[in-house]
Amino acid sequence: MADSTRQPGPPKKPLTLAEQVRQQKQTYDQQAYQRLADSVKPRPRVIVNALNAFWIGGIISALAQIITLIFASAGLNPRDAASATVIVMIFLGAFLTGLGIYDEIGKVAGAGSIIPITGFANSIVAPAMEFKREGFVFGVAARMFTIAGPVLVYGFIVSVLIGLIAYFLK
């Protein structure tokens, strides 16, 4: 009966003492390097990052609420005020991305700058700006939705599925 753990091919010859020592030294060097890398690797600042995301995302949301209240006080109904606010916030996100300011906000805020609608504008404008030197068609237009495209596609698919489920459950 053949041993099932045995590898096909010629049997391996045993390692010489020098080869064993070389293998052990290589393993030791790899472990020493890993310990050194772990000792100098920066520790994640989870609490600070979470607080920054919370307060900066809150400021962005509060700004959107102020803009909504301004539109409502100008006579727009709540739905139109909300729509106008979304337009203004997308413009501000795109504008600040164009100036390079939104990327600096994102470095501090993390997810606090990604989750609001301004993050969506940033995800469209940033790749477009990065590839603008390749021209309008092959640069800006082709790269504009590299980040936001999958989000839009899956968002549309899920919204259609939820709409169908809601339609058939009624």
Image (cartoon, rainbow, N blue to C red):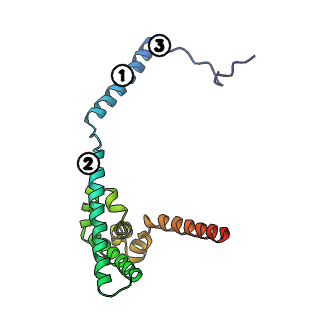
Residue 119, which numbered label? none
Q: Secondary structure at mark 2?
A: helix
Residue at the image point whose x is 28% and y is 38% from the top: 41
As measured in the structure, the alpha-carbon distance from the residue carrying label 2 to the one carrying label 3 is 54 Å
Neighbourhood count class around disc 2 (C-alpha, 10 Å): few under 14, some 14–19, many 20 upward: few
Q: Nearer the viewer, residue 170 or 130?
A: 170
As measured in the structure, the alpha-carbon distance from the residue carrying label 3 to the one carrying label 1 is 18 Å
Find residue 60 and report its horizontal and vertical position in percent.
29, 66
Residue 16, which numbered label? 3
Check if mark 2's residue and mark 3's residue have beta carbons within 8 Å: no
Q: Quadrant of residue 119?
A: bottom left
The amino acid type found where label 1 is placed reads: Tyr
Q: Name the outermost residue toward the top.
A: 17
Residue at the image point whose x is 62% and y is 18% from the top: 11
| Image side of residue 163 versus residue 16, left or right | right
Does residue 145 show up? yes
- Considering only order in the chain, which callout, 1 or 2, is on the residue closer to the N terminus? 1
Does residue 107 show up? no
Q: Which residue is mark 1?
A: 28
The amino acid type found where label 2 is placed reads: Val
As drawn, 152 above or below 29:
below
